[in-house]
Amino acid sequence: MALLEIRGIHKDYYLGKSVIHALKDLNFTIDEGDFISIVGPSGCGKTTLLNILGCIDKPTSGKLFFNGQDLATLSDNQEAGIRLEKMGFIFQAFNLVPVLSCFENVEFPLILAGIPKQERKKRVEYLVELVGLEDFSAHRPDELSGGQRQRVAIARALVNNPSLVIADEPTANLDSATGNVILETMAELNQKERVTFIFSTHNPDIMHYAQTIIHLKDGRVTGIDAGGSA
């Protein structure tokens, strides 16, 4: 079943009298449970596309459907509700709260959503163990390695039981060995939790982790391929 449908998406930015055509006539579908890599050189439009897919930005023209619903028909508050309840985000800079522990960083979205304390505890403990950080639950971000901090970010992205997790260059600030571990963790969670993952990268060496590879260049999709086996 289609989770996201992208139909004729364009995105333009205006710099004075100049127009930057960041995305140009994108058309593709993302199915539930897929594990997708968006690949291409820096500046090709990967982050712009992820921001649109994650309801952070709006296209200049075209249609985006989430679970069959035209997102253009929703209010800003309704879109914010979809981001909170249906989506998770993993950033290359981790974006953890430095004064909170691993447990508290993962728990934070549940507090915002008004989830009762006992339910929060159960869900956070499950995810912290799932990403292999049960022995680091009380540690703050500055007491964790880069790979461990990214695992905290993954657990936080999953804590609201999202249908979709979007990861923008999730391995960019990590060494290659740690980056591979993070991709393996995401792939394993994709299989166990059946969450759809979309991650961007400019590194062709990690494309084989994806089930589907979307190639982006100069704002256009230049190909969609089946991925390889990690």
Image (cartoon, helix red, strand yellow):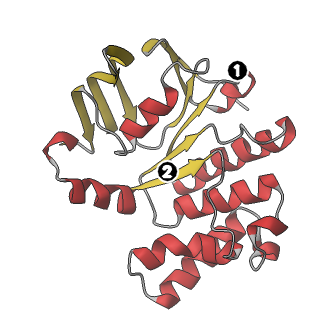
The residue carrying mark 1 is 204
User: Residue 220: x percent and y percent?
Assistant: 42, 13
* Residue 32 in the image: above or below residue 25: below
Give, as a three-letter code, the residue at label 2: Val
Q: Quadrant of residue 52?
A: top left
Q: Quadrant of residue 76?
A: bottom left
Q: Circle 2 — which element? A: loop
Q: Circle 1 — which element? A: helix
Residue visible at 51% across and 90% down in the picture: 118
The residue carrying mark 2 is 195
Q: Upstream in the sequence, badge 1 or badge 2? A: 2
Q: Is the Cβ of the residue at disc 1 closer than 8 Å to that at disc 2? A: no
Q: Residues within 10 Å of mark 1 (few under 14, many from 20)?
A: few
* Residue 163 in the image: above or below residue 161: above
Q: Residue furthest front?
A: 16
Numbered badge on residue 11: none
User: Residue 103: x percent and y percent?
Assistant: 66, 76
Q: Which numbered mark, 1 or 2, is in the foreground of this view? A: 1
* Residue 43 in the image: above or below residue 217: below
Give, as a three-letter code, the residue at label 1: Pro
Mark 1 and mark 2: span between their CA atoms?
Answer: 23 Å
Q: Is residue 103 left or right of residue 69?
A: right
Q: Residue furthest left?
A: 73
Would residue 49 be seen by someone viewing this image from the given angle? yes
> Considering the image in quadrants, where does the C terminus appear?
top right
Q: Is residue 48 left or right of residue 175?
A: left
> Considering the image in quadrants, where does the N terminus appear?
top left
